[in-house]
Image (spheres, helix red, strand yellow):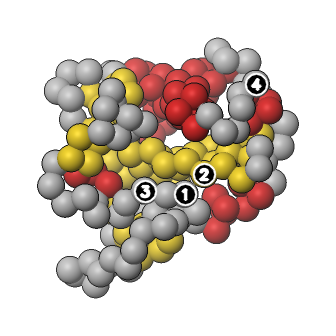
Amino acid sequence: MRLDAEMLDSASLRCSARTYSWDGAWISLGRFQRDFKPANDCPTVRRPTGGRAVHHGDDLTLAIAVDANVLGLDSRRLAEIYRFLVIPLCAGFEAIGQPVVPVNQRESAGDEMDCFRVRTGFDLVSTKDGRKRCGVALRVSGAAVLLQASMPGILAQRAGWTDGFIRGGAGLGWEWKFDS
């Protein structure tokens, strides 16, 4: 999470991205989330982005940092930024045969402290069964934008997803600095 925050602080004229996985089970808490006590004493870390608790361990996690001016977007238009930045994420899922689309509206499925129990208009859901496949959170600081995403169950397909993601971003004319 520290590296993701540093990416936000140094967002430049190129889109920076990094993917990572977790050493064992962890829970990341949203920047403004009130205290959350996991039932099984799982270690926690605070994200620089908002949202609810995310259970990590079997997920591929992604951070994207960019200056909104590079995207040609107004940094105050959060929904527009989200919609633009999820294009390469969708391309990554398409590349591994798991097409997704952004959710149309907020839907709750129980415990709203858990990211994957709530679907917002910025999350990605399967076109096949409507199941949430990717939780997305955003932070804007001045013109700098940080997007963080958690994608459970695709670690074994990481290389294929990453290739699709890079192609999806290149199709937008983005110049990537990609760390993995």
Number of the label disc, if any, that sits on residue 49? 1
Compute the Cα span from label 1 to label 4: 22 Å
- Does dot 1 land on a helix, a strand or a loop? loop
Q: Position of residue 87 (x, y in %)?
A: 53, 24
Q: Is residue 116 left or right of residue 170?
A: left
Residue at the spot of label 4:
72
Local crowd at mark 2 within 10 Å, few (<14), some, or many (≥20)? some
Q: Residue at x 71, y 28 (%)?
A: 73
Q: Position of residue 59 (x, y in %)?
A: 37, 52
Amino acid type at mark 3: Gly
* Discs 2, 1 touching: Cβ within 8 Å: yes
* Discs 1, 3 touching: Cβ within 8 Å: yes
Q: Position of residue 156 (x, y in %)?
A: 36, 43
Residue at the spot of label 3:
51
N-terminal of the pair, mark 1 or mark 4, is 1
Compute the Cα span from label 2 to label 3: 10 Å
Residue at the spot of label 2:
139
